[in-house]
Image (cartoon, rainbow, N blue to C red):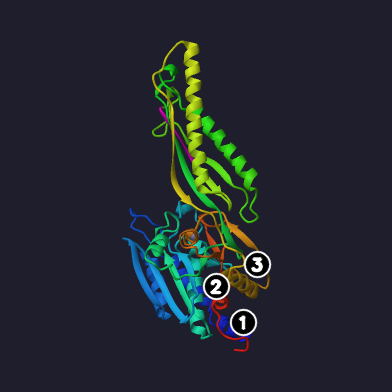
Amino acid sequence: MIPEKAIETVLAQIDPQKVIDLTARLVQCNSVWDPQAGTNETEAAGVAAAFAREQGFDVNVETVVPGRPNVIVRWTAGPGKRTLMFEGHTDVVTPGDRSRWQYDPFGAHIENGRMIGRGTNDTKGNLAAMLVAMAAIKAAGVPLAGSVVGGVLCDEEDMMIGVQDFIKQGHADTVTAAVICEPQDGLVCIAQKGALRARYVVHGRMSHGAMPLAGLNPAPAVAQIISGLAGLEAVAIEIHGQDPLLGWPSFTPTVIQAPAQGPPQLNVVPGEAQILVDIRTIPGQDHETIRQALASLAEQVTATVNAHYRDLDDRLGIDRPFEITVTVDFLSDRPCTRTDDTDPVVGAAVWASQRVSGHKPDFAGVPGATDGTYLWALKDIPIVTMGAGDRHVPHQVDEWVDLDQLVDTARIYALTALAYLYAGTDDA
Ligand SMILES: [Zn+2]
C-alpha cells in the first residue's frame, strides 16, 4: 500500500495546462518524415529535449540517421534494480489532403475540450503526458528506488529505426519494464498481434491474349495460392482459436497484381503476377512454422499448375518448353507480444488507472505493432501499452484527443511510476 500522502504529492505536481501546452507545441511541429518536403522529427525532438532539460533531466539527443533523432531522458531516483521506461514517438503520418481537414493539421486548435491536429492522438498528446508525468514524479520528492528513462523516438510509423537504434546503443539493457504511450482509450494493453508480411511472385510467360498457348498464364497459380492461404488460415483458426485479447489469426492476401509491374491490358497474358500477404498472429503461432508452410505452398502450387499445363498440352498435342515458377519471400516479421498479467508493471498500471479513473481498467490487445514489439522481442522487456485517445482516430483527418482524458493519462503515467518504483514504508 502506497500512502495516500505520497499519491497526493505526486498528483499535485501534474499541471493540466503544462500537458496541454506541451502537446500543442509538439503538434505544431510538422514531423512527417518527408525528405522531399524537408520535414522530419528534428523540431519535435528539440521541443521534447528542451522541456526535459528545463525539468532537470539528463538529456541526450542521438542522430539515428540525418534528420531523425532519438531523445533519451534519464533520471535516477535512488539505488534500485528497476528501471521503468516510458516510450513515445515523435513522428506522425501525413495529414493527406489538407482541404479535407476542418482545421490546420498543425494548428493544435482547441474546441469543446478537444485538441485537433495530426499527432494529437497518435501520439504527441501521450508523449507530452509522459514527459509531464516523469517531471512530476521527479519533483514530488517521494522515496523511490531505481530509475526512469524516457525514450522519445523517431520513425515508429514506418520501419521503427528509432527503437532499434535505442536498443543497439544499449539503452534498453537496464530497462526492466516499459510503458508504451499510444492511444488506447484508457485500456491497459498487455498483448499485441504479430505481423508477418510475405510476397509471392508467379513467373509465367507473356503472350497475346488471342494466343494463350504461346505463353503461360500465371492466373491458375494465383488462384491456388489464394485458396491455399485460406486453407492455412482455417488451420490456424482451428488449432489456435480466438485469443481473448487479440481475436483470430489471419492470413490476408491484400495486394493481387498481374502483371506484377506495369499496366494491365485485356488482350495480354501477363508474364508475372504477385500477391502480397499480410499475416497477423496471436500467441502460440510460431512464425518459423508459418514461413515453412508458405514456402511449401509455393512448391505445391508450382507442381500442380505445371502438371495441369502438361495435361493440357498433351490433350492439345503441343509442347511448351517452359514452366511456371512460384517464389515466396518475406518483407517483414514482427512477433506477437504478451506480457504476463502478474508482472509488476501490469499491476502498477492497473492500480494507477483505477486510482485516477475510479474504475478497474479492462485488459486489451493492440491489433498492430508498436515500438514496444521490439523491446519485448529483442530485450524481453515486459510492456504495457496505454494512453489517451480513441483507438480508431489515429491516421484520420481531423485527428483529435480529449484533453481531460489526456491530463488523466499524465496522472496515470505518474502513478504507474510511483507504484513501480515506490521504496517507502506504509507509514512514510
Ligand atoms: Zn503511434
Question: In the visual, does 309 lie left or right of 250?
Answer: left
- For disc 3, the marked residue is 361
Circle 3 Cα neighbour tier, 10 Å, few/some/many (<14 / 14–19 / ≥20): some
x and y, in percent, of residue 276 in the image: 47, 40
Marks 1 and 3: CB-CB under 8 Å? no
Give the magenta range. 271-276
Circle 1 Cα neighbour tier, 10 Å, few/some/many (<14 / 14–19 / ≥20): some
Amino acid type, label 1 = Ile
Among the two numbered marks 1 and 2 on one chain, the one whose residue lies closer to the N terminus: 1
Q: Residue furthest right?
A: 359
Q: Is residue 220 magenta?
A: no
x and y, in percent, of residue 396 in the image: 52, 54
Q: Secondary structure at mark 3?
A: loop
Q: CA distance from mark 1 to mark 2?
A: 16 Å
Residue at image point 48% right, 34% down:
298
- Disc 1 C-beta below 8 A from ligand 1: no
Q: Secondary structure at mark 1?
A: loop
- For disc 2, the marked residue is 413
Question: In the visual, does 191 lie left or right of 101?
Answer: right
Which marked residue is nearer to the observer: mark 1 or mark 3? 1
For residue 10, say whether it is visible: yes
- For disc 1, the marked residue is 2
Q: Is residue 275 magenta?
A: yes
Which residue is more in the foreground, 362 or 338?
338
Among the two numbered marks 2 and 3 on one chain, the one whose residue lies closer to the N terminus: 3
